[in-house]
DNA sequence: ATTTGACATGTAAAAAAAGACATGTCAAGG
DNA sequence: CCTTGACATGTCTTTTTTTACATGTCAAAT
């Protein structure tokens, strides 16, 4: 259950509302740990009951601002230093899973799928570049440095996905796996 | 629910048992899509009920060999060509999530966590090299080429994780985010 | 005035995944 | 002969995630 730790992590940066947290997941964090808004509101309540966060303020339109508590800080630090076992280290990434099975397709579909994948990940890599460019360059802020590091890993991954799709395009046999490209 | 497609994909390569499938997940596929043995047995039954796979043979110790059907092949081809939306493209990767929050730690923990992460991912990258070396070099087999492509992506990711951890080690402020390393 | 659309928070039910438990087979070594 | 350990398949319960439903606020444009 990393959801609670992701929430604690964001709240460690600054107090914010469920809505703010939802937005953060929607446009960046969700690529690494997808979460829906209802899950967030449910978990915020649980976190509050356990005393890891507290309701620190109200805003317009029923807005509720939560802040992390000392106990919450302790808990996220515990999680950050906890050794991860093989299960926790595993990633869940459908596009890569799919790439491992593309050889099942016959020529036409294979080429169009791989072309689409390459294209998609080149765009994603470019998008990450833009997004990194918008990050302020304060090295006094650890959270920015960490975000940058995560973005760089993402860029490496997207780049590798694009490269892999491109490479498979001319490596894979043309008939669904029963013969080589040519002599 | 990519589980069923992962199973269909493996069975597209060759008929095998739930146990065989479990082993495949344990030592490679599980890094991209983690699955437990009970989930596999449950899904095999469902897949059989839907006519996507069939019981093709029995083996020693109650072993049951499943083979993919034409309907199953159709279904996995459909899945492989289906456009993926943003949700399906998202990855779930706790170690990277964690990396994004390490700045919360104070100096000592920070350094030891980052050192451990770098070390871990250097080892993982090395392990992938070994594993790629054991893959036969038949380019007549599309499934091998696809596996190789997936492994290359994995290597890029592991390498990037190690680099990111290393870079953060000397980028991150030494006091939990309230000052730069020095002038 | 009213409609549109972003803001904002929730509940309930269904599906998927994780964790714990349970059972039996067969080969090799002591 | 008996024990150990890999082989092999399952069920049951709980937790987590997804999907669908539900309600209300406030600002800006028509």
Image (tube, coloured by chain):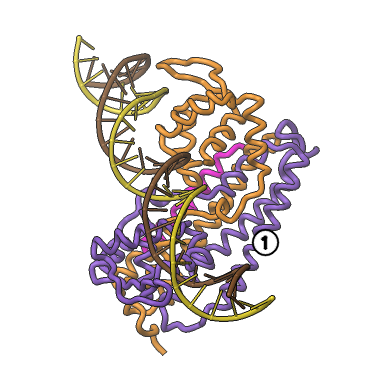
Chain colours: A purple, B orange, C brown, D yellow
Give percent across and percent down for residue A88: 38, 51
Read off the residue under disc 1: A122
Q: Residue at x 72, y 31 (%)?
A: A178
B14 on left or right of C9: right
Q: Chain of mark 1?
A: A
Where does the magenta region start and end?
B115-136
Q: Does the magenta-highlighted stretch encompass residue B64?
A: no
Characterize the local packing of mark 1: few (<14), some (14-19) or many (20 or more) Cα atoms within 10 angstroms: some
Relative to B38, say whether A118 is above or below.
below
Residue found at x 62% / y 55%: A161
Q: Quadrant of residue A37?
A: bottom left
Name the chief secondary structure element in magenta.
helix
Tell me which residue sits at (52%, 41%) in the image.
B1
* Residue B110 in view, yes or no: yes
**Residue drawn at point x = 33 percent, y = 70 percent:** B110
Per the image, label 1 sits on a secondary structure element best described as helix
- Residue B27 visible: no
Horizontal side of A77 relative to D24 (left or right) equals: left
Point out the residue furthest to the right here: A183
Decide which of B59, B55 is in the foreground and name it.
B55
x and y percent of residue B152 in the render?
58, 51
């Amino acid at each position: 259950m990393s959801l609670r730790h992701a929430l604690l992590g964001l709240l460690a940066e600054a107090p914010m509302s469920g809505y703010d947290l939802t937005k953060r997941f929607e446009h960046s964090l969700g690529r690494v740990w997808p979460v829906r808004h209802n899950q967030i509101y449910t978990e915020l309540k649980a976190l509050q009951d356990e005393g890891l966060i507290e309701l620190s303020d109200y805003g317009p339109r029923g807005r509720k601002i939560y802040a992390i508590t000392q106990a919450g800080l302790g808990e996220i630090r515990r999680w950050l230093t906890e050794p991860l076992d093989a299960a926790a280290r595993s990633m869940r990434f459908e596009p890569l899973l799919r790439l491992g099975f593309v050889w099942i397709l016959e020529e036409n579909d294979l080429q169009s799928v791989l072309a689409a994948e390459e294209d998609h990940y080149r765009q994603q890599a470019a998008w990450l570049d833009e997004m990194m460019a918008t990050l302020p360059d304060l090295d006094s802020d650890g959270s920015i440095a960490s975000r940058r590091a995560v973005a760089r890993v993402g860029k490496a991954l997207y780049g590798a996905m694009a490269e892999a799709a491109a490479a498979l395009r001319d490596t894979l046999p043309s008939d669904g796996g029963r013969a080589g490209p040519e002599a």
